[in-house]
Each structure stands twice: as structure tokens, then as C-alpha cells.
Image (spheres, rainbow, N blue to C red):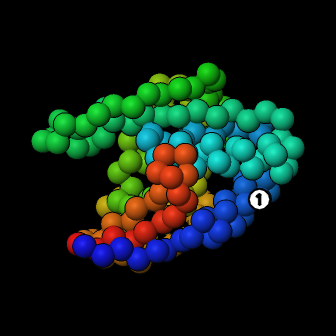
Amino acid sequence: MSQKVLLTSKEINIILHRLACQLMENHLDFKDTALIGIQPRGVFLAERLVKILKKEYKIKHIDLGSLDITFFRDDFGRGEILKANSTQMNFLVEDKKVVFIDDVLYTGRSIRAALTAIQSFGRPSNIELLTLIDRRFSRHLPIQPTYRGRQVDAINEEKVKVMWEENDGEDKVYLVSK
């Protein structure tokens, strides 16, 4: 097994700041916007973006939540035992602009599950998708990100592995080959 570094800590930091700027352009004061990290790994990205938006751009309040999609997945109950995470949303999404945040967009199935799961919290006026890595040639569903950090052309046997300082001890993105 070999792994190649796709993004270094410095490159991830630059991308996070660019994504924060793009969110600012479209959502200004975030009054009618909710950022929702998709469990488990999208939460780290969402928290980082909120930290940048508050510190660098002085946004006072941002609705930030985390959404567990385990029981909404189309492969739930099909062999592998899945471990549920927690959903934390202290707000309704009714008539809000929602931005789903996930680390890697691969087949699109996780986002389809998130679209179903979010209905339990209201009907958003708009839903966007922000992803750090877009594996663009791997879709099973017609889902595309509104905001993307980097596009990666990886073949199916390759895996994109995103490492976060808070969880893994370093900020890096690897392309892992078997």
C-alpha cells in the first residue's frame, strides 16, 4: 500500500480561507444560514470554517450543527454493521439556507442520505454543498458541490484520506493506493 500527499497543512489552510471567503460572498452575515457538518468527518471541516469566519471576518453568530446520516443511508442493514454518530442541531432549518459540509464527495450517496435526514428539522429554502475534496469521476448520483476545495481524479481502488489535527494529529490529505 502506498500513499501520496495531495494537500499539506499549509495548502489545507489556504483552501479553508478561500472556502470561508466564498461562503461570505453568498451568505454575508449568516443570519438566515445554517452550516451543517455531516458526521463524522464533515464536522471537523465545518468547525474549522466557523472558527475562520468568526475570527477573521468577525461574524458574530453562525448556526452550526452536525447531522448523522447512518439510518438514512441506502446501504443501511446490508451487511456491514454501521455505528451511529450524534446529530446536534439547536435550531430549525425551516426557510433557512443550509450548507452541508463534508470532507470528501465520492459517490454522492452520503449527500442523498443527508437530504433525506434534514427533512426531520424543517424545510430549508435552499441547500448547498461544500466539500474539501471532490472525487469528480466517481458519482453514482447527479450531485455536485457548490463549493469545492480541490478536485481529485482518483480511480476506484484509490482512497482519499483526510487527516485533521483535532482528530488525527495532523492536517493532511493523502491519496492511498492498495
Looking at the picture, does residue 3 appear above or below residue 149? Answer: below
Label 1 residue SS = helix
Res 96 seen here:
no
Q: Is residue 138 above or below residue 104?
A: below
Q: Is residue 115 above or below residue 85?
A: below
Amino acid type, mark 1: Cys
Residue under label 1: 21
Asked where in the image residue 4 lies, by quadrant, the reply is bottom left
Question: Could you tell me residue 168's position as x and y percent?
Answer: 46, 51
Q: Quadrant of the C terminus?
A: bottom left
Q: Position of residue 170 (x, y in %)?
A: 53, 57
Residue lying farthest to the left in this orientation: 79
Q: Is residue 139 left or right of residue 16?
A: left
Residue at 65%, 68% in the rendered image: 10
Of the 4 image quadrants, the one containing the N terminus is: bottom left
80, above or below 9, in the image: above
User: Residue 24: horizontal and vertical position, in percent?
Assistant: 78, 53
Question: How many residues crowd around disc 1 within 10 Å: few (fewer than 14), some, or many (20 or more)?
Answer: some
Q: Residue at x 39, y 56 (%)?
A: 108
46 or 161, nearer to the observer: 161
Position of 19 compared to 164: left or right?
A: right
Return the x and y of residue 107 as percentages of the image width and height: 35, 59
Depth check: give the residue in front, 20 or 124: 20
